[in-house]
């Protein structure tokens, strides 16, 4: 044996950087203070012995897996230490998105290939012999935030050529590599705010706000660049900033969220027809349009700019295309109602215009009612037994029936239909009240038909809330999450809360909801805000007094007139 003297006891990264290590266990403080991942320490036996006798060979075989794993960590740490400037740091993170998070996705080819590189014997020996070593490793908070966002809010389609999903454009763009600075900063901001919105994680809000400020600066730079302003990544970054406001909502109003959506709409208009050439562009167009329709339906203010060009786009499936056509028509009726009743004299021409609008809305109401008759079993709605639902919190039981859907996508389409119907009947009530003023407008057969339709849609939304407040993706048939596995005992996914919180608010503020329904919906909104982490639900609850429909709308119309 050859003794080489006393070896250095420092960690591998400190030795590579040629700095003094404090030799703390399991990881040194030098690496932790510099926010680097400590790769650990080399085997002291390996440092003293240089020959290969039979005894050393046997011991080396037992520790070979540890050394190989530590070498991988050392290489990653050295790469991070060599890249100090901001631009190289972004490139390193871009590679990390692709190699770290997405290749480990359930069912992916990269995951299978990485598993095949390690023999089953080595894997078993690693898990049994070195279980304590792995238990001491701590996942960096940045990776925790990214994995949480991908496993809770990002739905990707598992069908070839399918477009069903939610925020999957971010996943697809990031996996292609070389993401832009604005998109990467916005993705980090949303990742941190998603994790910070959960209970006991609010301390991460400072980090989220830092990334959000950086993303705003990068988006402003991209918008001023003629080459970047029309790219998918810039539009995706703006939509992610709007998503940030949905989860954070640190302000008392929705102005920032609305401004982001309007900014995305302007980018869509600037991009023109070419935006539909990619699946990511088509998804972002649909998301921009749907969120714009949502803010128009919830906002009592009259929109001064013309966004009608945003409302026309073909959808693939026949039933979904029909739903989109009718809901867009309802939104156009809402905009016409705002323009007609926004002020001015009650001259014969205006009265005739309101009468024609009322007839159009009543005809549209019959068409919306026809959507309750789906053409296939996929679009059928089942009434289920209450205790057959998945895991739930201690909230009160819903009044009335409880619905079950084929999947979350089906539930989303139906809630869009029901919300559109409520907004349409609100327009009918406003036109009736304007034409009948100062007499009482709450009478007649047309009024009773509209009231009955409104009450039915409120009951439908209430019946759909338990499904969305217990959906965790374990029974998903058409969509999957990029990371993580779901079981029947998993908690509710955040993406299900995004589907239901606006419809729940639309039913809550209706004058025709019963006190029991209002109480239940208020509790579910608080659950989505405080437990699931969708803080915008709290902001909506604060505005429910001014958003009461149709009473407050009619009051505003009379003041304007």
Image (cartoon, rainbow, N blue to C red):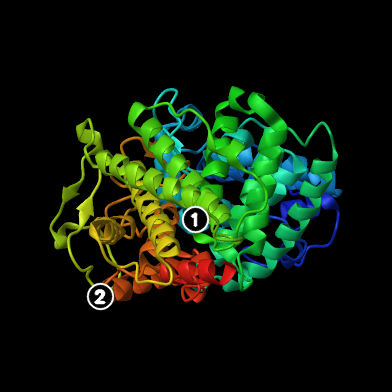
- Dot 2 lies on which element? helix
Give 126 or 175, whichever is nearer the viewer. Answer: 175
Residue 152's spot in the image, x, y percent? 46, 52
Numbered label attached to residue 51: none
Q: Residues within 10 Å of mark 2 (few under 14, many from 20)?
A: few
Numbered label attached to residue 297: 1
- Dot 1 lies on which element? helix
Q: Is residue 336 above or below residue 104?
A: below
Residue 271's spot in the image, x, y percent? 70, 31
Residue 231's spot in the image, x, y percent? 72, 33
Q: Looking at the image, do the residues carrying marks 2 and 1 touch, with CB atoms under 8 Å apart?
A: no
Give 168 or 9, whichever is nearer the viewer. Answer: 168
Q: Is residue 420 left or right of residue 204?
A: left
Q: Is residue 165 visible?
A: yes
Q: Is residue 110 left or right of residue 508?
A: right
Residue under the image location 21 percent in, 38 percent down: 373
Distance of label 2 from label 1 (alpha carbons) = 24 Å
Residue under the image location 64 percent in, 25 percent down: 273
Quadrant where the N terminus is found in the figure: top right
Q: Is residue 93 above or below residue 203?
A: above
Quadrant where the C terminus is found in the figure: bottom right
Residue under the image location 39 percent in, 52 percent down: 424
Q: Is residue 245 above or below residue 365?
A: below
Q: Earlier in the sequence, mark 2 or mark 1?
A: 1
Find disc 2 in the rendering and name its residue: 516
Q: Residue furthest left?
A: 385
Give 306 or 74, whichever is nearer the viewer. Answer: 306
Residue 349's spot in the image, x, y percent? 54, 49
């Amino acid at each position: 044996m050859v003794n080489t003297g006393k070896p250095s006891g420092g960690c591998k990264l400190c030795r590579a950087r040629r700095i003094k290590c404090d030799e703390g266990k399991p990881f040194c403080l030098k690496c932790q203070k510099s926010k680097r991942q400590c790769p650990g320490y080399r085997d002291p036996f390996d440092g003293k012995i240089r020959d290969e006798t039979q005894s050393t060979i046997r011991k080396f075989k037992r520790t070979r897996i540890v050394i190989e794993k530590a070498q991988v960590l050392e290489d990653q740490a050295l790469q991070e230490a060599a890249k100090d400037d901001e631009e190289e740091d972004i490139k390193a993170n871009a590679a990390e998105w692709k190699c770290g998070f997405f290749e480990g996705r359930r069912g992916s080819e990269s995951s299978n290939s990485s598993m095949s590189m390690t023999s089953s014997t080595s894997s078993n020996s690693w898990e049994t012999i070195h279980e304590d070593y792995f238990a001491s490793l701590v996942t960096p908070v940045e990776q925790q935030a990214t994995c949480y966002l991908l496993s809770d809010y990002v739905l990707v389609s598992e069908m070839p050529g399918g477009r069903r999903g939610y925020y999957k454009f971010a996943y697809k763009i990031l996996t292609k590599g070389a993401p832009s600075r604005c998109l990467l900063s916005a993705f980090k901001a949303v990742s941190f705010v998603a994790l910070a919105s959960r209970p006991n994680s609010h301390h991460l809000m400072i980090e989220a706000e830092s990334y959000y400020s950086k993303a705003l600066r990068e988006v402003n730079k991209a918008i001023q660049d003629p080459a970047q302003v029309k790219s998918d990544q810039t539009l995706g970054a703006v939509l992610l900033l709007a998503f940030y406001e949905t989860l954070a909502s640190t302000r008392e109003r929705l102005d920032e969220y609305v401004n982001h959506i309007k900014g995305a709409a302007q980018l869509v208009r600037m991009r023109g027809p070419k935006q539909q050439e990619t699946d990511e562009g088509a998804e972002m167009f649909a998301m921009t349009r749907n969120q714009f329709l949502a803010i128009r339906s919830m906002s009592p203010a009259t929109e001064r700019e013309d966004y009608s060009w945003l409302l026309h786009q073909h959808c693939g499936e026949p039933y979904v295309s029909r739903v989109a056509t009718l809901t867009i028509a309802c939104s156009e009726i809402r905009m016409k109602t705002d323009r007609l009743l926004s002020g001015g004299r009650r001259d014969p021409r205006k009265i005739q215009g309101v009468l024609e609008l009322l007839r159009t809305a009543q005809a549209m109401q019959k068409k919306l009612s026809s959507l309750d008759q789906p053409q296939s079993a996929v679009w059928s709605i089942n009434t289920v037994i209450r205790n057959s639902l998945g895991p739930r919190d201690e909230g009160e039981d819903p009044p009335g029936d409880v619905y079950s859907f084929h999947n979350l996508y089906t539930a989303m389409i139906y809630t869009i239909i029901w919300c559109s119907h409520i907004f349409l009947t609100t327009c009918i009530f406003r036109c009736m009240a304007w034409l009948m003023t100062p007499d009482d407008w709450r009478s007649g057969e047309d009024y009773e038909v509209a009231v009955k339709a409104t009450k039915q849609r409120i009951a439908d939304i209430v019946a759909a809330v338990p499904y969305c407040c217990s959906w965790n993706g374990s029974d998903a048939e058409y969509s999957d999450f990029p990371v993580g596995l779901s079981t029947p005992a998993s908690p509710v996914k955040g993406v299900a809360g995004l589907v239901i919180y606006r419809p729940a608010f639309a039913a809550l503020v209706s004058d025709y909801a019963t006190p029991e329904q209002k109480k239940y919906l208020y509790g579910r909104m608080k659950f989505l805000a405080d437990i699931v982490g969708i803080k915008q639900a709290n902001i909506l609850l604060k505005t429910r007094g001014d958003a009461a429909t149709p009473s407050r709308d009619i009051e505003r119309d009379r003041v304007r007139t």
